[in-house]
C-alpha cells in the first residue's frame, strides 16, 4: 500500500471529496488536544503498520486549543537533531467531524473512535489508483 498520508493527516484531510459516515455522533473535542502518533492505515481491507517512523523520532499530528493542526514528519536522523517537515492547517470540530483548511483547500474526515489514548479517523480516497474511492481508516496513539 502506498504511503497514504504523505505529510500525515494534513494530506489525508485533503485527499478526498467526502467521508463515508453521515453520523452526527458527538465527541469530546478536548480529547483531541495532544500529540497523536501514527500507528496504522487500513485501506481495501488491508491494515498496514505505519512504517515511516525514524529511530530518532516518530511522525505525529497535534491538535491545539487555538484551532491549529500541526503535522510533523521526522525524516532525517543524521545529526544531533532530527530534521522535520511541518505542515499547519486550521481545524474545527463539529459532532464527530474534523474539518481542516490550508492553502484554500478544505476537507472533512470522520472520527470513528476517540479515547484518551486512541484516535481513529476515516475518509474516502482512491488509495489503489483504480479510479474508485475506498474508505481509508487511520489509527493513532497518544503514546509515542
Image (cartoon, rainbow, N blue to C red):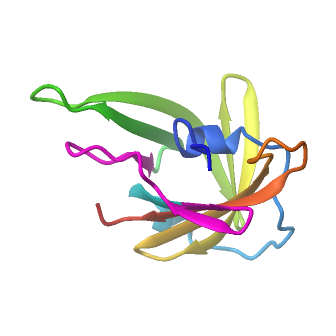
Q: Which residue lies furthest to the left in this view?
A: 80
Instruction: Locate the C terminus and report the quarter of the image it occupies.
Output: bottom left
Quarter location, residue 57:
top left
Q: Residue at x 74, y 56 (%)?
A: 123
Q: Where is residue 72 in the image (x, y as percent from the top left)?
A: 40, 38
Q: Which residues, given as a range, are shown in magenta?
A: 41-64
Q: Residue at x 52, y 36 (%)?
A: 7
The answer to whether residue 102 is above or below residue 136 is above
Along the line of sight, the residue nearer the viewer: 111 or 90: 111
Q: How many labels does the image show?
A: 0
The answer to whether residue 119 is above or below residue 1 is below
Q: Position of residue 26 (x, y in %)?
A: 69, 74
Q: Position of residue 13 (x, y in %)?
A: 67, 44
Q: Is 81 positioned to the left or the right of 141 in the image?
A: left
The answer to whether residue 31 is above or below residue 73 is below
Q: Where is residue 103 in the image (x, y as percent from the top left)?
A: 67, 22
Along the line of sight, the residue nearer the viewer: 43 or 124: 43
Amino acid at each position: 500500500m502506498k504511503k497514504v498520508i504523505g505529510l500525515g493527516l494534513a494530506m489525508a484531510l485533503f485527499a478526498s471529496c467526502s467521508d463515508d459516515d453521515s453520523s452526527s455522533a458527538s465527541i469530546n473535542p478536548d480529547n483531541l488536544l495532544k500529540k497523536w502518533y501514527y500507528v496504522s492505515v487500513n485501506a481495501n481491507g488491508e491494515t498496514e503498520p505505519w512504517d515511516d517512523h525514524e529511530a530518532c523520532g516518530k511522525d505525529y499530528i497535534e491538535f491545539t486549543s487555538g484551532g491549529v493542526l500541526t503535522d510533523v514528519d521526522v525524516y532525517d536522523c543524521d545529526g544531533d537533531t532530527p530534521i522535520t517537515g511541518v505542515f499547519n492547517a486550521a481545524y474545527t470540530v463539529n459532532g464527530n467531524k474534523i474539518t481542516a483548511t490550508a492553502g484554500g483547500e478544505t476537507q472533512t474526515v470522520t472520527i470513528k473512535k476517540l479515547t484518551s489514548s486512541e484516535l481513529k479517523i476515516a475518509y474516502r480516497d482512491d488509495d489503489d489508483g483504480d479510479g474508485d474511492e475506498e474508505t481509508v481508516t487511520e489509527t493513532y496513539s497518544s503514546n509515542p
